[in-house]
């Protein structure tokens, strides 16, 4: 199977941008040239790689070739930067897609990425830490912060630490809905805030205390800052990370509705097994920041 570099770049661009036209703009060619390259790539692979929908989507075979395309692009970029290639100078950017859970993104990941050497750029995909490995598996990202210790095929895993979450609420909310403390009856009836329908932390806390599945009145706020703000405004209780609530706890504006109760969520760095200086630089920055931010090991 003879796959050309320009064809692989076209596939990556189409799936990143979502349309042939946008891919053409990114690569500074015509949409017709993109179409021809994709057709040639599919002929070489002997199968359909793209679903011509809006946005364009990869078939299962397309995901396998996409992973190859992004590996080749990363390694080619590393080599060009090392050699100072005239056609791809050392300052030409390398793009690394990474899956990150919302709470890490809002608290400690951005300062970590700011330490990465110039010329490396990021395409961040926000996803629940329990689901980021899906994006690694299908080739959408090269690395992920995940709660899964088992490596995805072709990836390696390093532990980062853990984020500690507590069931927090305003003092007024706790006094109204938990007057007798964290009883099963209180947990069953008290309004709760969820990040989204993939967010299982509140249900984990409920199962610990009620010992059965319950469905209390719920708000869904799919924003890390918005989620914390909903709890601060008294809309409900929610599992908030210590990294977001230190000032609130010190000032007494948020309290733990369940004494010292907490849930520790372990986090891991998974990345493709590639000898890539750029990817290694990102991994080092993430590990260094996690050593400070995630003190629970």
Image (cartoon, rainbow, N blue to C red):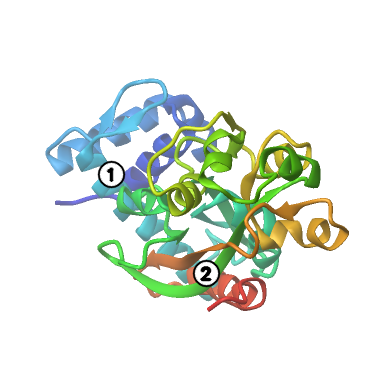
Identify whether 145 is placed above or below 115: above
- The image quadrant of residue 251 is bottom right
Q: Is residue 135 above or below residue 50?
A: below
Q: Would you place residue 254 above or below residue 59 in this image?
A: below
Read off the residue under disc 2: 278
Whether tag 1 and tag 2 are in contact, CB under 8 A, the answer is no
Element on which disc 2 rests: helix
Q: Which mark is drawn over residue 95?
A: none
Residue 277 appears anywhere in the view? no
Q: How many marks?
A: 2
Q: For the residue carrying disc 2, how many other residues have a C-alpha within 10 Å: few (<14), some (14-19), or many (20+)?
A: many
292 or 234: which is nearer to us?
234
Is 113 above or below relative to 82?
above
Query: Would you say residue 103 is visible in this rendering?
Result: yes
Mark 1 nearby-residue class (10 Å; few <14, some 14–19, many ≥20): many
Residue at disc 1, secondary structure: helix
Disc 1 from disc 2: Cα separation: 23 Å
Residue 290, position as x, y percentages in the image: 60, 72
Image point (83%, 51%), residue name: 253
Q: Nearer the viewer, residue 261 or 151?
A: 261
- Estimate the x, y position of residue 199 in percent, counting from the top left: 49, 43
Q: Residue, x 50% and y 29% (percent of image)? A: 22
Q: Name the residue located 36 percent from the left edge and 59 percent from the top edge.
A: 72
Residue drawn at (40%, 37%), measured in percent from left and top? Answer: 15
Q: Earlier in the sequence, mark 1 or mark 2?
A: 1
Residue 134, position as x, y percentages in the image: 34, 49
Q: Position of residue 160 (x, y in %)?
A: 51, 73
Residue 63 is labelled as 1
In the image, is 281 to the left or to the right of 68?
right
Q: Nearer the viewer, residue 183 or 134?
A: 183
């Amino acid at each position: 199977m003879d796959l050309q570099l320009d064809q692989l770049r076209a596939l990556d661009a189409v799936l990143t941008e979502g349309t042939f036209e946008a891919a053409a703009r990114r690569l500074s060619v015509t949409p017709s040239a993109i179409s021809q390259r994709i057709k040639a790539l599919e002929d070489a692979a002997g199968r359909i790689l793209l679903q011509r929908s809006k946005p364009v989507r990869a078939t299962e075979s397309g995901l396998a070739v996409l992973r190859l395309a992004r590996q080749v692009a990363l390694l080619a970029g590393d080599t060009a930067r090392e050699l100072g290639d005239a056609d791809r100078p050392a300052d030409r950017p390398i793009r690394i897609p990474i899956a990150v859970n919302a709470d890490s993104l809002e608290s400690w990941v951005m300062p970590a990425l700011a330490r990465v050497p110039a010329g490396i750029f990021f395409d961040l995909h926000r996803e629940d830490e329990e689901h980021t490995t899906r994006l690694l598996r299908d080739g959408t990202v090269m690395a992920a912060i995940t709660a899964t210790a088992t490596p995805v095929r072709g990836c390696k895993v390093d532990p980062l630490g853990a984020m500690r979450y507590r069931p927090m609420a305003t003092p007024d909310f706790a006094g109204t809905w938990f007057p007798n403390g964290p009883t099963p009856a209180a947990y069953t009836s008290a309004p709760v805030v969820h990040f989204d329908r993939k967010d299982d932390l509140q249900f984990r806390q409920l199962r610990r205390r009620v010992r059965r599945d319950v469905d209390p009145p719920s708000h869904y706020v799919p924003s890390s800052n918005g989620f914390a703000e909903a709890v601060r405004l008294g809309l409900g209780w929610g599992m908030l990370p210590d990294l977001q609530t230190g000032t609130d706890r010190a000032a007494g504006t948020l309290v733990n509705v369940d004494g010292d109760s907490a849930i520790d969520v372990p986090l891991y760095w998974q990345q493709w097994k590639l000898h890539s200086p750029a990817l290694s630089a990102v991994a080092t920055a993430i590990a260094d920041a996690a050593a400070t931010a995630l003190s629970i090991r």
